[in-house]
Image: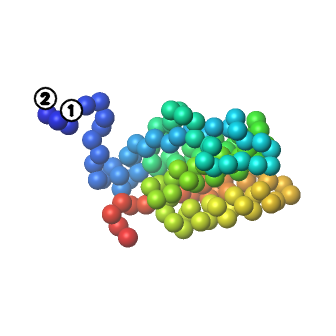
Amino acid sequence: MDENSNNETPAYPSHAKAGLGIVELPQPDLTNIAEGMFQRSDMRQQGRTDRIQARSFGSHVAQRVEAVFQQRGPVSAAAVLSHYIECGKHVLLDPFSARQLRALTNSMTKSNQPEEFYRRSVRPFLLGLMPAERGQQ
């Protein structure tokens, strides 16, 4: 057996460019979020991750945020969105997209209708994210 024979699929540059690479994202821990206050450093649940294709990052985050909106409200949804921005920056998000998402998250928390703001502004941005082609600047 050669040294590369394991259960993981080898990483092919063409797959990475197409967003087909598999990434693991730590799941957010919502138990420490108090309404109106959260700490980003407390957001990672120990050992719980989601394995997704890089190209589905935006839709995955949108699904997670929408579920938290329904269960816990807008402050928790903003905390989850911030968690995924931190997880995705430098790997799945280019610097511009990370800044834009942070600005949208801040605007969402300040909005009188955060769920409507999310639906009209944040969600379309998330669903429009495409993986950056690796190695090209």
Q: Are marks 2 and 1 in contact (CB under 8 Å)?
A: yes
Local crowd size for mark 1, using a 10 Å CA cut-off: few (<14), some (14–19), many (≥20) = few
Q: Residue furthest right?
A: 112
Q: What colouring does the structure picture have? A: rainbow
Residue under pointer 1 = 5
Q: Is 133 drawn above or below residue 68 in the view shown? A: below
The residue drawn where x is 51% and y is 53% is: 88
Q: Is residue 2 visible?
A: yes
- Residue 63 location (% of width, % of height): 63, 42
- Residue 7 location (% of width, % of height): 29, 30
**Residue 1 vs residue 136: left or right?**
left
Q: Is residue 127 visible?
A: no
Give the number of marks: 2
Residue under pointer 2 = 1
Q: In which quadrant of the rendered image does the N terminus lie?
A: top left
Residue 134 vs residue 30, the one in the foreground = 30
**Residue 42 vs residue 25: left or right?**
right
- SS at mark 1? loop
Q: Residue furthest bottom?
A: 137
